[in-house]
Image (cartoon, grey):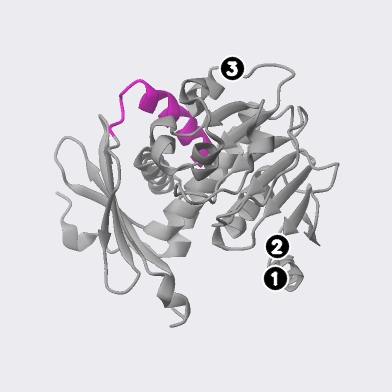
Amino acid sequence: MIQPTALPPLSAQQTAAMLPFDKLCQALASAATAYQAGQIVSPERQVLPLAGSGVLLSMPASAHDIGIHKLVNVCPDNAARRLPTINGIVSVYDALTGLPLLLLDGPTVTARRTAAVSMLAISLLHHGSPAHVSLIGSGQQASAHLAALAALYPGIRVDVHSRQPDAARDFCTQHARLPLQLQPASGSIAAASTVVITLTTSKVPVYQQAARTDRLLIGVGAFRPDMAELGPLPIAGSQLFCDDPAGARHEAGDLIQAGVDWNSVASLADARAGRREPNRPVVFKSVGTAAWDLAAARCALQCRQASTQAPS
């Protein structure tokens, strides 16, 4: 019998090793269909205040095989303390017995499954493999997305846009070892870029170009109604997909401020079912759900099982 004392929390590096992007995308694809079919229960996250400007986020999910609980603390003032802004764990339990199975690093799970959702959206909604991608933002999520692009699309060109040119240059230097053609950028997105991923917490749009049928837009950073990375212009006339349409009604500031018809917003499962309309621009909005953390936990368990069964 597994005892809680036998389960120390895994480090960020150990957690990342159990979440390879190819297998994580596969787990997310299956979870998207199961989530839409009601086979994964993922209630709205609970937000509790902490001291200062911090918040505690509680996000459980359950399915036939496992249950998970992601408990993370977001403390913006930690930047001044030279401490991580996000801390927490994802605890994984056997669904039948309730026994603990894994304790994963919470920020790592969030970063990697969010990047993997974007990669899944590219595979489902982009016309073929991308050769030129643009990232807007140079924070932790941008780092996770670079790692995902390097793993799944090595050798492609990736432009990194930031409001501060020095930040973009430093970011590219820090990630220079990745097998990507990294280019710091500012101003307009290059015309050759066919995927644009916004990864900021901006309250004003950082992308306002007209929608193009040959360019997939993925909005990741805006997670509150008062945030909006994508302006109304690229959203208007585009076919809209969201990883979690129900959550997006409360969190996707880009879509809320654009006044979209929520009945027209399709899901990640719809994208997987091939419901993309030809010859129409596409916007994919990612807001996240604990169902994706459950998919990551499944991936980690499978990787652990594979490693224990591998011949020595």
Q: Position of residue 181 (x, y in %)?
A: 80, 55
Q: Position of residue 118 (x, y in %)?
A: 58, 41
Q: Are marks 1 and 3 in contact (CB under 8 Å)?
A: no
Q: Amino acid at mark 1?
A: Ala
Query: In the rendered structure, which disc, 2 or 3, sits on the residue that comes first in sequence?
Result: 2
Q: Amino acid at mark 3?
A: Gly
Q: Tell which residue pokes out farthest to the bottom in this image.
A: 81
Residue 40 on the magenta span: yes
Query: In the rendered structure, which disc, 1 or 2, sits on the residue that comes first in sequence?
Result: 2
Where are the magenta residues, as a range?
Answer: 22-41
Nearer the viewer's eye, disc 1 or disc 3?
A: 1
Asked which quadrant contains residue 87, the reply is bottom left
Residue 274 — which label?
Answer: 3
Q: Is residue 12 left or right of residue 93?
A: right
Residue 79 position (above or below residue 259): below
Q: Kindly identify the residue that appears in the image at 75 percent across and 41 percent down.
A: 209
Q: Is residue 20 visible?
A: no
Q: Residues within 10 Å of mark 1 (few under 14, many from 20)?
A: some
Q: Is residue 142 left or right of residue 245?
A: right
Q: Amino acid at mark 2?
A: Ser
Nearer the viewer's eye, disc 2 or disc 3?
A: 2
Q: Are marks 1 and 2 in contact (CB under 8 Å)?
A: yes
Residue 44 — which label?
Answer: none
Q: Looking at this view, is 149 or 75 the one in front? A: 75
**Residue to which mark 1 is pinned:** 167
Name the chief secondary structure element in magenta: helix
Q: Kindly identify the residue that appears in the image at 71 percent across and 69 percent down.
A: 164
Q: Secondary structure at mark 2?
A: loop
Residue 164 position (above or below residue 271): below
**Spatial distance from mark 1 to mark 3, Cα to Cα?**
38 Å
**Residue to which mark 2 is pinned:** 162
**Spatial distance from mark 2 to mark 3, Cα to Cα?**
34 Å
